[in-house]
Image (cartoon, grey):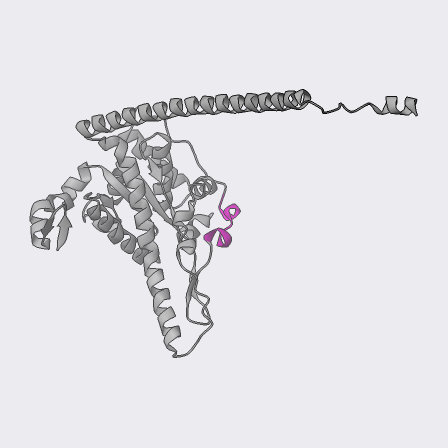
Amino acid sequence: QIALGGDILTRAEFKKHFDYLLQPEFQERELCHCFISYRHGPENNSTIKFLNSLKAHGANSLRFYNIFHDTALKEGKDFVQSFMSALRRALVCVPFISASALHRMKSVAALSRDIDHVLLEWTFALWLHETGRIKKIVPVFIGEVTENEHGMSTMSKLTDDVNLEDFPDEVNGMTYKELCQYVEQEFPDDPKPRRRSVREVVQKMFKFQTRCLCCWDLLVQNDCQDTGQSAKYAEERMQNRQEKDLVFEKCARFVAEVIEETLWPQDGADPEEQNHLEELQMRLEKQEASLEAANQRLLKQEQLLADKDTRLKEQEEQLQLKSQSAQPGQKRPRSTSKVCSLQ
């Protein structure tokens, strides 16, 4: 069952009412909320977990996210045109960056021989971001996962594993040519994309780094020293596996928040609700101004009371001096100098 507002729908009912949202024809002409860019291989399972979690977050917020993942590509259609078309309509681009994704980009021999489609996606995403078409680029950084001697999964920091200076400071000619052809075809009035070396593209992607999407920070590193068949060891191993599975769910939650924050200015608020909020804001500002004025008046009254209290004390001291001098039979003390002269 699926909760939709105050209603509970079965999967069949949900599909009956909203199946059109899942059709490729709808997805190809509508806004792409999120474009997932990744290298085929080790990150396949990671991106699928991320994709499913992101869809779930969209359903929970009553959003039906149009997410591009290459599993949605249709057979018989041009591969490059399909993912470039989705990327140009994307609101947010999420590149999955790992050592395996970057390995091919280090090859100098491939610079003039092959089109690197991941490099093409990243270069196009940077151009779209600079021209204001893509609103956010939020990379997911993945380190190498290994098991320690206690059977616990740990993840290294990608920033420690990768040296950005290892990437060629040259342009991948075939990839750049493919990018220019697409931009000229789809954006004839826009300037030609500038040439970026492989190193520059990778360095630029690393500048979008955010702690929220560094997977090694999201994976709880368990320092269990217990081994064997103890209940504690089994429990902590199970917790470690669960934490490993939750890493990409946490990433999806963060990206869903980014999508919602980016969508809000486009969607706008309901006019009546907006007017109500503005009215409440004005009333709040007036109340704050009244409180500030009352506070100022209170401070002035406190100062007046303090001045009055000071004057009263001065008057009391003067009265005490006068009463002492007016008491009969009390001799005034003689000065020391006169006493000495008499002696």
Q: Is residue 79 visible?
A: yes
Where is residue 92 drawn, in percent x and y?
Answer: 31, 40
Please name the residue shown 39% across and 52% down the image.
101
Residue placed most toward the observer, 141 or 272: 272
Where is residue 293 drawn, in percent x and y?
Answer: 39, 22
Q: Is residue 88 visible?
A: no
The image shows residue 343, relative to residue 152, as above or below, that is above
Residue 330 lies in what quarter of the image? top right
Residue 85 lies in what quarter of the image? top left
Say whether residue 164 is magenta.
yes
The image shows residue 79, relative to residue 216, as above or below, that is above
Residue 6 appears left or right of 253: left
Where is residue 237 drawn, in percent x and y?
Answer: 37, 69
Residue 311 appears left or right of 43: right
Residue placed most toward the observer, 290 or 310: 310
Instruction: Point out the stretch of residues depicted in magenta.
Output: 158-168
Please name the residue shown 43% across and 24% down the image.
298
The image shows residue 226, relative to residue 16, as above or below, that is below
Please name the residue shown 91% across and 22% down the image.
342
Say whether residue 246 is magenta.
no
Residue at the extreme bottom of the image, as rendered: 229
Looking at the rendered image, the quarter that the N terminus falls into is bottom left
Looking at the rendered image, the quarter that the C terminus falls into is top right
Please name the residue shown 15% across and 40% down the image.
26
